[in-house]
Image (cartoon, grey):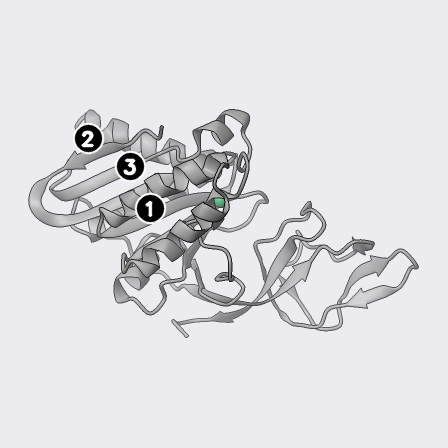
């Protein structure tokens, strides 16, 4: 149902799983992982030790339709209970395959992309785990998002939540905009950096970068009858008191919070998030 490629080096090394296209409309992970398959098969990259498993396209039906998902968001149902809740959906058949594959590896990395044009981010919800922290730091992406009640919600589990519950160091990379060729480069470089870091392939370690650590504190929701008047895509920050929405009666609603705007999506449907409002730190908080 889901194609996977496994490559082995000398025994004794770590094992790692990379997944792409958990959301069917996010091609960059699939393209980057297929490039890695090609480079291993043509001999330009050699696996020195350990085991590498690549699942470039985790939601093939949604991929064919270039949709985020068919019945339910695959990256929200990653637990046995949630699979049971959504039994009968297409994604409930896929989730157990991914969970089992996470179980069979030491490390896990999930590659995604954004709807809007935004700077890449690594999501590291396993932010008390040194190995997860290290993967987030060395993959070459400046911005690192940590766990918060906004990322970890009741009744919803991402792939990286499943990995954390099972003590597998893990990160999720949002490599850029869905169809931007640059997002493929960000994803591919991150994958290579992680493999070098784990000693699984030969290569130069990346230069350390000054990271921006962000924690989501509140959400800007799209509510019925409110028109967004804030220039969401032109601003990185929002400040308390900024005019944000206009109601049907012409009343202006002002921002309650100050912070970095993250995961911005101007075209979000009613009931969903326009953006998260975040605190920013220059080290692991
Ligand atoms: Zn995604």
- From the image, tell me which residue sits under label 2: 44
Q: Quadrant of the N terminus?
A: top left
Residue 111: where, in percent of width, then height?
A: 40, 44
Q: Earlier in the sequence, mark 1 or mark 3?
A: 3
- Residue depicted at x 53% and y 37%: 69
Kindly tell me whether residue 215 is visible in this rendering: yes
- From the image, tell me which residue sits under label 1: 99
Disc 3 secondary structure class: strand
Q: Earlier in the sequence, mark 2 or mark 3?
A: 2
Residue 194: where, in percent of width, then height?
A: 27, 50
Q: Nearer the viewer, mark 2 or mark 3?
A: 3
Q: Is residue 228 left or right of residue 209?
A: right
Query: Does the residue at mark 2 contact the one at mark 1 (Cβ under 8 Å)?
Result: no
Rounded to the nearest angstrom, the CA distance separating label 2 from label 1 is 31 Å
- Alpha-carbon neighbours of circle 3 within 10 Å: few (<14), some, or many (≥20)? many
Rounded to the nearest angstrom, the CA distance separating label 1 from label 3 is 14 Å
Rounded to the nearest angstrom, the CA distance separating label 2 from label 3 is 17 Å
């Amino acid at each position: 149902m889901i194609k996977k490629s496994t490559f082995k080096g000398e025994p004794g090394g770590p094992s790692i799983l990379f997944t792409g296209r958990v959301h069917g409309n996010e091609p960059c992970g699939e393209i980057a992982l297929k490039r890695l398959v090609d480079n291993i098969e043509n001999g330009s990259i050699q696996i020195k030790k350990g085991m590498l498993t690549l699942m470039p396209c985790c939601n093939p039906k949604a991929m064919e339709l270039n949709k985020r998902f068919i019945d339910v968001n695959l990256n929200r149902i990653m637990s046995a209970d949630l699979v049971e809740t959504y039994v009968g959906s297409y994604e409930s058949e896929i989730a157990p395959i991914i969970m089992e594959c996470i179980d069979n590896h030491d490390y896990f990395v999930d590659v995604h992309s954004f709807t809007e044009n935004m700077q890449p981010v690594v999501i590291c919800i396993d932010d008390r785990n040194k190995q997860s922290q290290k993967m987030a730091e060395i993959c070459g992406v400046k911005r690192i998002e940590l766990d918060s009640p906004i990322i970890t919600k009741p009744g919803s589990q991402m792939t990286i939540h499943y990995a954390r519950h099972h003590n597998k160091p893990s990160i999720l990379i949002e490599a850029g905009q869905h169809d931007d060729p640059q997002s493929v480069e960000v994803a591919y470089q991150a994958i290579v950096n992680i493999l070098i870091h784990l000693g699984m392939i030969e290569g130069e370690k990346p230069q350390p970068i000054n990271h921006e650590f962000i924690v989501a504190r509140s959400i800007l929701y799209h509510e019925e009858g409110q028109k967004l008047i804030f220039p969401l895509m032109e601003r990185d920050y929002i400040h308390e008191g900024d005019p944000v929405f206009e109601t049907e009666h012409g009343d202006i609603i002002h921002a309650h919070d100050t912070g970095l705007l993250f995961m911005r999506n101007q075209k979000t449907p009613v009931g969903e998030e326009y953006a998260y409002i975040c605190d920013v730190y220059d080290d692991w908080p």
